[in-house]
Amino acid sequence: MRPGYPGTGLLRVTNVQKIFASSRGTYNALDGVSLTVKDGEFLCLLGPSGCGKSTLLNIIAGFEPITSGSVTSDEAPITGPGRERVMFFQDAGSALFPWLTVEENVRFGLRARKVRKAQWAAIIERYLVMVGLDAHRAKFPAELSGGMRQRLQIARALAVEPKMLLMDEPFAALDALTRRRMHAVLLDIWQRTGKTIVFVTHDIAEAISLADRIGVMSIGPRARITRLIDITLPRPRDVSDGRIAHLFKEIEDLLAPDLERSEQQMQKRNLPLGVAQQ
C-alpha cells in the first residue's frame, strides 16, 4: 500500500470454490481460495496458464458466479457487476468505442453513470491530464499507440470513480519498453488516487515491480492461492537490485513444480487420444 496508508479490508474472498460443468463433465477450477485485499492495496495474482487467475478476477468483478464460499466488497456480497469495480482487459482497443474520440470515450462513461453534466469538463480534463492524453483528446482510438489506448481505458475508468481496478494482464500485448512505461504510469496513478488494484499476471518481474503483495496460485484443477508474499522493497524498484533478483529466484522456484505440471498437461493434450490415455 502507499506509504502511511493503513488500509482496511475492502475485498474478502472466503473459501471459494468454482466448478464448471459441461457436456464432458465437471472441472473444479478453484478450490478453497481465501484472500483479503485492503483498501488502497496493489495486489498481483501470479501463476502459470491454467491456474484460475482470470477466473478468480471474473468472480471478483461479478461476471462469474461462485459454486460455494463467499465474496464481499465493503461487507456486501458480490452477486454481479458493480460500479465500484472496473475491469480492464489486455486488448484495450476492443474495450473502447472506435467511432468516438479520446474525450468522447471518457465522456461516455460519465453519461452512462449519470454524472451531472456540469461536472463533465473538469472530470475529463483531470483524468486526461493524469494519463498524459490531454493533447490527444481529439484523436480516435485507431490513431493511438497500444500504450496510449491502455491509458485511455484507465482514464475512462477513473472518471467514474470506482473503488477497485481489476486488471487482467493489461500490458501483455505491449512491447517491453512500452510495458515498462505503463508500469510507471500505473504506479503514479495508483499513488495519486489511492485506488485498490487487483492485477493478474504470469510475469514474475512485473509482479515484483508493481505489487504490495503477490498471491501465488497453483495450477488447476483445484487451484488455490498457495502463498501470499509481501513485497516491502521501496518504489521505484530497480531491476538491478540484488534483493529483487533473490525474490525473483524464490518465486521462480515456488512456481517450478506447477510449470512442469502445466507443460506435461499440454503435452498430454497434444498426444493422440489412445496414447494420452495410457
Image (spheres, rainbow, N blue to C red):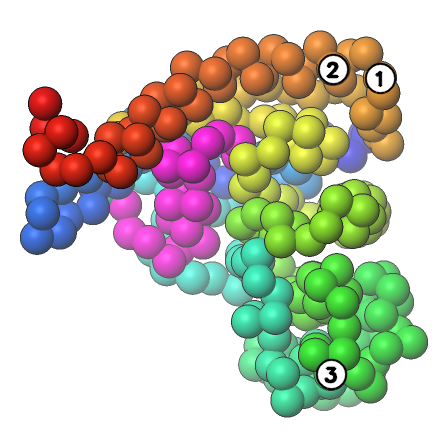
Residue 82, image x, y percentages: 47, 62
Magenta segment range?
45-66
Kind of residue at badge 2:
Ala
Which residue is the site of mark 3? 140
Answer whether residue 65 is visible to the viewer in this image: yes
Residue 23, image x, y percentages: 8, 53
Q: Which numbered disc flags the more N-terminal residue, 2 or 3?
A: 3
**51 part of magenta stretch:** yes
Residue 14, image x, y percentages: 36, 32
Mark 1 neighbour density, 10 Å: few (under 14) some (14–19) many (20 or more): few
Q: Secondary structure at mark 3?
A: loop
Kind of residue at badge 3:
Phe
Q: Secondary structure at mark 2?
A: helix
Q: CA distance from mark 1 to mark 3?
A: 40 Å
Q: Is residue 92 above or below residue 32?
A: below
Which residue is the site of mark 1? 241
Contact (Cβ within 8 Å) of mark 1 with mark 2: yes
Q: Which numbered disc flags the more N-terminal residue, 1 or 3?
A: 3
Mark number, residue 245: 2
Image side of residue 228 versus residue 102, left or right = left
Kind of residue at badge 1:
Asp
Quadrant of the frame with the C terminus: top left
Residue 226, image x, y percentages: 43, 19
Identify the residue at image location x=55%, y=71%: 94
